[in-house]
Amino acid sequence: MLGVCAVLLCVSAACITAQETPAPAENRTITDMAGRTVVVPSEIKRVICTSPPPSTFVYMVAPDRLAAWNSALGKNEYIPEKYAEGIEPIGGGGSVVVTNYELIISLNPDIVVVSCTTGDEATLASIAEQQKKLGSIPVVAVKDARNSTGYSAPIRFTGDLLGEEEQAEAMIAFYEGILATVTERAVSIPDGERVRVYYAEGPQGLATDPTGSVHSELIELCGGRNVADCALNPGSGMTEVSMEQIILWDPEVILVLDPEFYATIRTDPLWQEITAVKTNRVYLIPRTAFCWFDRPPGINRIIGIPWTAKVLYPDRFSDMDLEGLVKEYHELFLHISLSDDQIWGILNL
């Protein structure tokens, strides 16, 4: 009889415990980075982004939650195979925003993340229109962080949104450590000693972005002087310039975006009298999963900060372990380990 009573007591205690333990909430309310109040699932397993910048945030913070790549972003050797092959490509590479709402809905995401720069009326109206077309799927706005000194907030927001706070804080610590080291040294460089830099874009190197463009930000951030004295082309950038202008600017360093142009610049007679070419200070901007310097001008540029600093001022940054930073960045942000040989090949060492 006592045994039966004991069992009944245990069962009753278990029932009380179960009743007292609240079931996990199915939803929670957040404020997104456009200032909107949004109700999202408490556990977010599948995320689709309508453009590359937020896709980069989600992949770096929580790669298992990314349900679709924009265009073929994930198809390269620096993305682990399970993410390169296992995530649907939906279009929207470059600056193109995916507007195929039927496709997005068919992939059954828990949320859709859109990029925003501000929370002004036009932005809010655009997001509201997207929300209307996506029906019950919550739309969450994340700052695209085109400002290379402003990456911490959207990384932290994405970590909080997806329950990956520890990963986000590790990324922020890496980023802020690099940023502090580079900017503290760069700000002390006298104006007369700042290296003259030309950012060569396009198949002939005859397009560029001047000071004030988000595309050339790392030049000034790292203490260089952008020689491009030309109009700023809003939006996608890439202002066309002439060879005569470049000769007059006579840069000491040329940063090259296009690999085919990089392969020919040293032998092209038009470029032979440029100081950077004569002194062999022409550098191909590295690209692993994403470009390190630009296009997109997003958090993929974090590793471009120490690379640019060391290219412009090898003596001032001689103590910076660039190879070690590259290895750590790829493990922490891109979820892949690189061999020393791979790193040396990327850096052309």
Image (cartoon, rainbow, N blue to C red):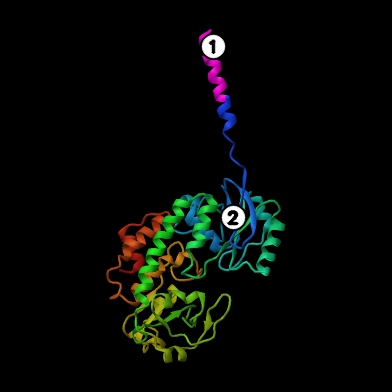
The spot of residue 324 in percent (x, y) is 32, 61
The spot of residue 278 in percent (x, y) is 33, 85
Depth check, mark 1 against mark 2: the one in front is 1
Q: Quadrant of residue 182?
A: bottom left
Q: Secondary structure at mark 1?
A: helix
Residue 129 vertical position relative to residue 244 in the rendered view, above or below: above
**Magenta stretch, overall SS:** helix
The spot of residue 287 in percent (x, y) is 43, 66
Note whether residue 38 is visible. yes
- In the picture, the disc for residue 48 is 2
The residue closer to the viewer here, 167 or 70, is 167
Asked whether, in this view, residue 346 is left or right of residue 102, the answer is left
Residue identified by numbered label 1:
4
Q: What residue is rendered at 34% in x and 84% in y? A: 190
Q: CA distance from mark 1 to mark 2?
A: 55 Å
Q: Quadrant of residue 329?
A: bottom left
The type of residue carrying mark 1 is Val
Residue 4 vertical position relative to residue 169 in the rendered view, above or below: above
Q: Are marks 1 and 2 in contact (CB under 8 Å)?
A: no
